[in-house]
Image (cartoon, grey):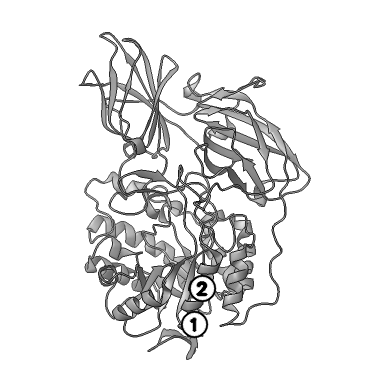
Amino acid sequence: MPEFVIGEHDFLLDGRPLQIISGALHYFRVHPDLWADRIDKARRMGLNTIETYIAWNAHAPEPGEFDLTGGLDLDRFLRLIAEAGMHAIVRPGPYICAEWDNGGLPTWLLRDPELRVRQNEPRYLAAVRSYLEKVYEVVVPHQVDRGGPVLLVQVENEYGAFGDDKLYLASLTQYTRAAGITVPLTTVDQPLPGMLEAGSIDGVLHRTASFGSKSTERLATLRAHQPTGPLMCSEFWDGWFDHWGAHHHTTTVEQSAADLDALLAAGASVNLYMFHGGTNFGLTNGANDKGVYQALITSYDYDAPLDEAGDPTPKYHAFREVIARYAKVPDSVPPPARAAPTPVATLRDPVRLLESPERWGTWRTHERPPTFDELTPTPRLALLSKEIEGGEPGVLTFGEIRDRATVFFDGEHVGTLLREHQDRAVRLPRARGELVVLVEDQGRVNYGPRIGEAKGVIGGAFLHGEPLLGWEVLPIDLDAVPELRSGATEVLGGPVAGPAVVRGEFELDEPADLFLDTAGWGKGMVWINGFALGRYWRRGPQRTLYVPRPVVRAGVNEIAVLELDIMLEPGARFVPRPLLGHTEA
């Protein structure tokens, strides 16, 4: 069997130096029927390796579950990499960041108030060990020394930016080796001395760095803290991610190509982050909070060499040209993008949440507004209802809203509270009436000390300064939402006020990638043929949602839209190209 080791200066495969030229491709952000296509396009750009994170919360949404089917079939993904003649790097965390909801950590961990994540805490370590054992049951047979593609396994992720618990890192290393991982183990940190020292263990875990510019300078910093062995930038940031309400980030092709050239010329190995970003389908986007909460958009295009729809960009061709100076690249290149079909659909037959909430879930009684984390399963959207009786009109106040609350009184919208604005209060128009609050989790923080924080209403609700007690709470079953039907035919002649589900049909001659234009809508989610595309929001920058070709079919296709705000144009239209919003330039 092949032997892969860390040498004095190089990675050595069967005794010969190997410069790893890798690209990040997250299987959980790409439709599984498109994995082979994306892997092949990586090979044709000149890459010899595919890197992926593993998202714990995707595989284990509840305790005792571990899903390895469909889009989570890690075994199939690794087999496809091997069939393409490529190597693989696996990064199972348990924390991955990745602009992914909660950094990949399952929300159910935090139901135990004593549990502490990312440290040498017994209950957390027990859960992590169980998770890693399940992951490594899949990965172990795919290691290079068993004839498979996996060259490296990473322990934790940018841990030096979070903590310095060496016992924690040692425990993860022990679990990894005990589970049968024999290939070299690595860590990654930003090239700052404190982070590089805190995030690894000398002589046990091989240090690599993450950066997107100043390659020569940052490799020198890495070398000072990893004096022997190969240098590697295992996250070469060739683009960036986007937040709702901000601009679409891009990096210049010329500068990114020059920095990649400097890395390869220095003999360093590299992993492009990202080669192909993909999509935060469903409700999987993360968020950042460095004083202001900012949720990530649905697209994870990342301005990567291969765009969200899997088409080559100018950066793809520039990187391929750079790689060709250092390694052999295949002769053929992928074809350019083609204009997508542009069907239209009339949306109709609304099912209004406030008219029939019992169709959307099951009411539960709580003395105080519960956090989402106190509910099982943990919802992303919930209704809270209470009758207000007597007294004077007053101000409704919450301890904190995470992340958005729409307040209705006797069915009338009286205000929307946004976490990023630090909104906490709204005036009620009357002394008596039915108070209904729709609360939305817009994505859990994936980086920094706020990882694992609770969602929903935090710290209770108050009227006239007194606690409001005795609530009915309805967690909304979003999996069932696209199947809600009105039972009547109602043509929409104008704008639609949410929360409501509307639906329609469109026809295609044959399956194709599509780009759904949401410009005339407010805020919500979309399903096509039952597949959850993700969130839209008129504040941008993202204006189109990517629809993968395998999701649609020749003939009639169904679209369902959950509008939470106001849909100005009750119709669905598709456009030829993605529209990801304005840039800084």
Q: Is residue 20 visible?
A: no
Query: What is the tally of numbered marks visible in this picture?
Result: 2
In the displayed structure, would residue 367 be above or below residue 272?
Answer: above
Looking at the picture, does residue 58 appear above or below residue 213? Answer: above
Residue with the most extreme front position: 585
Number of other residues with Cα within 10 Å of mark 1, as a class: few under 14, some 14 to 19, many 20 or more = some
Q: Of circles 2 and 1, which is in front?
A: 2
Q: Position of residue 314 (x, y in %)?
A: 62, 64
Q: Which residue appears at 25% of the width and 62% of the height?
A: 163
Give the residue at mark 2. 258
Residue 510 in picture, x, y percent from top left: 76, 48
Quickly name the residue at label 1: 265
Which amino acid is tagged 1? Ala
Identify the secondary structure beneath mark 1: helix
Residue closest to the eye, 265 or 45: 265
* Furthest residue in direction right, as rendered: 509
Amino acid type, callout 2: Ala
Residue 378's quadrant in the figure?
top left
The residue at 65%/47% (across/down) is: 551
State the residue in front, 66 or 344. Answer: 344
Locate residue 338, reporting x and y percent.
Answer: 72, 55
Q: Secondary structure at mark 2?
A: helix
Say above or below: 475 vs 10. above
* Picture layout, residue 232 above or below residue 384: below
Q: Is residue 225 visible?
A: yes
